[in-house]
Amino acid sequence: MESTRTPCEPEVVVGFDDSPSAQAALAWAARYARSAGLRVRAVHVLGQVPDPMAWVSSYDAAGYLGESPTPEDVEARIKDVVRQSFSAVRPEPDWRLDFVSGSPGKTLINESRRSQLLVIGTREHTGIERFFSGSVSHFCLGHSIRPVVAVPAPDDPEHPDDVRVSTAHPEPR
């Protein structure tokens, strides 16, 4: 098992997927990184898109992407939306947004192994949704060798900086 004494890069890794909680996590990470002199690396995990129409907005379904969008069309649209959201924090020149394929929890743990901190958004999963999708935030909190900050979506969209932040620091292994 890898030790927590592994040398760290001067970066904060943020799991980012354009959800309100992920946007709050990116905003928190940006403030923290700027205050600590670190860079930000936002990681968007691309999963398999089983049905292109399930991921396309009604505007897109009405003809923006054509009658039958391919999985590649849907992926390109998702990347565009995520890039626009990342740009909203006015990233510093050395910050970056990476698109990585895989299982979200495992991929974020792997991508953050050499970072100083992993920041993730949290959202409420209840009942059957949690059974099928699991919780990326719970997985990361339980498996990371680095400190994890979990940021929920703001309760008041008018005041996005008013969020409750939970932190976890892993036990030395």
Image: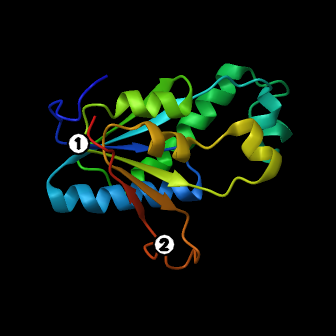
Whichever of labels 1 and 2 marks the residue nearer the N terminus, that label is: 1
Note whether 79 is above or below 154 in the view shown. Answer: above
Q: Are marks 1 and 2 in contact (CB under 8 Å)?
A: no
- Colouring chosen for the image of the structure: rainbow
Q: Is residue 49 left or right of residue 93?
A: right
Left-right relation of 61 to 5: right
Q: List the residue tagged with mark 1.
A: 11
Disc 2 designates what residue? 160
Which kind of residue does numbered mark 2 sit on?
A: Pro
Residue 21 occupies quadrant: bottom right
- The 10 Å Cα crowd at callout 1, few under 14, some 14 to 19, many 20 or more, is many
Q: Residue at x 17, y 35 (%)?
A: 8
**Quadrant in which the C terminus is drawn:** top left
24 shown above or below 172: below
| Residue pictured at 34% horizontal, 55% vertical | 29
Helix, strand or loop status at disc 1 = strand
Q: Is residue 170 visible?
A: yes
How far across and how far down the image is residue 32, in percent? 26, 60
